[in-house]
Image (cartoon, helix red, strand yellow):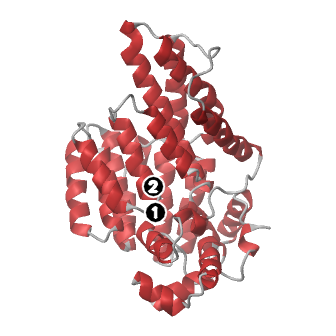
Amino acid sequence: MRELDETATGGPIGARLAAWRLRRGLTREDLASGTGLPLDYVAALETGGEWMDRRGRLAALAAALRLDVADLTGQPYPPRGEEHAAVRAVAFHLRRRVARLHPDSAAGMPLEELAEQTRAAARADAVGDEHALALALPELIEAADHAVVTAPALGRAEAMRLRVQVHVLGAGLLRRLGYKDLAWMLLHHARPDTHEPLPVLVEEVRLLIDLGLPEYALARAERAEDAGAGWELPALAAVAQAMAGRRQHAEQLLAKAAGRAADARESAMVVAARSAVAAEHGDAEEAAVHARAAELTALDGAQRSRLLTVAAAAEARQDRADQAAARLVEADTAAPLRLRLDPFARELVAALAARTTNTVQVAAVRNLAERAGLR
């Protein structure tokens, strides 16, 4: 059944919210009281007058219904097209790898080749090419595990570093697909003995944020600080603080992130984080201002797509649906599959389908909805 046909009039998350609320035997008043959210917001979310664009609110609704946030977002989504199907299939391969105690003895790869292929996978991740990343990961993870066992003493540290990097790339893809339990297992698999490498800790913070657990994310971020974190960790912690409703703490962390930014790309990423924090706080105007201030050309495709999605949501919140649609199309151009797997982007596509008036943008939003499996 097509996603938007599942219940009457709500968007993807609103439709599931209504269905789960009824299964739990709750009224809208019960849900509003249990979450502290306005009753009219809950009603509008269920009936299509509102859409979900704040992680903190999503987490509050899921907690009140005793659900994982994925039960409301619908992840992992049914495959739409050959590339999406190929990307989803990687979860099967990685689950099988995690279940095995030892790497395949035939999976050897020279360390130099492993390093080159890992760099290529990291580039695919940065530009948002989920398909290329998914195709590379099973062999890379197997080869990295094998390298740690077979590398000579002088190459062991490099083999361990590559193994961590490859597992973090895999966990990130699984997180975005919605296989968050498997992502957590893969991160645990990446740890050498009891040591917690910084990239693993940072990805765990991302995962906990996506799970709707900001307090756990902040606790993990504190541990990562001891490992010598740079700009990224305080930026992520700022989002977690915003989810928890602590705007002042979020601003302090953003200032720390800005002070640690070492180049134009990192500075642009901090500005993008400022936009995300403002959006999480519910200040659409400020989110739009920060989004416009970010240097898009300094960002990779995946980062650019995410910022443009936040910008689109901010425009839509200010009743500028046509401008929001244009931004969303830009985001799709930057990293198509990355956008279509993002639950908040999918929410926005569904919301804009009923709000966009410009003929060109109406066609573009409908095309996006079709390719995302939303119509």
Q: Relative to the observer, which residue lies in front, 263 or 121?
A: 121
Disc assigned to residue 179: none
Circle 1 — which element? helix
Label 2 packing within 10 angstroms: few (<14), some (14-19), many (20+): many
Kind of residue sitting beneath label 1: Ala
Q: Relative to the observer, which residue lies in front, 65 or 122?
A: 65
* Residue that carries the numbered disc 2 in the rendered image: 307
Q: Can residue 239 be seen in this view?
A: no
* Residue that carries the numbered disc 1 in the rendered image: 311
Residue at x 41%, y 69% (from the top left corner): 56
Q: Relative to the observer, which residue lies in front, 64 or 109?
A: 64
Please identify the quarter of the rendering in which residue 20 is found: bottom right
For this view, does 363 lie left or right of residue 60?
Answer: right
For this view, does 228 lie left or right of residue 215?
Answer: left
How far from the left and from the top, in percent, is residue 7? Answer: 72, 79
Residue at x 74%, y 53% (from the top left corner): 80
Label 2, label 1: how many angstroms apart (C-alpha)? 6 Å
How far from the left and from the top, in percent, is residue 106? Answer: 65, 14
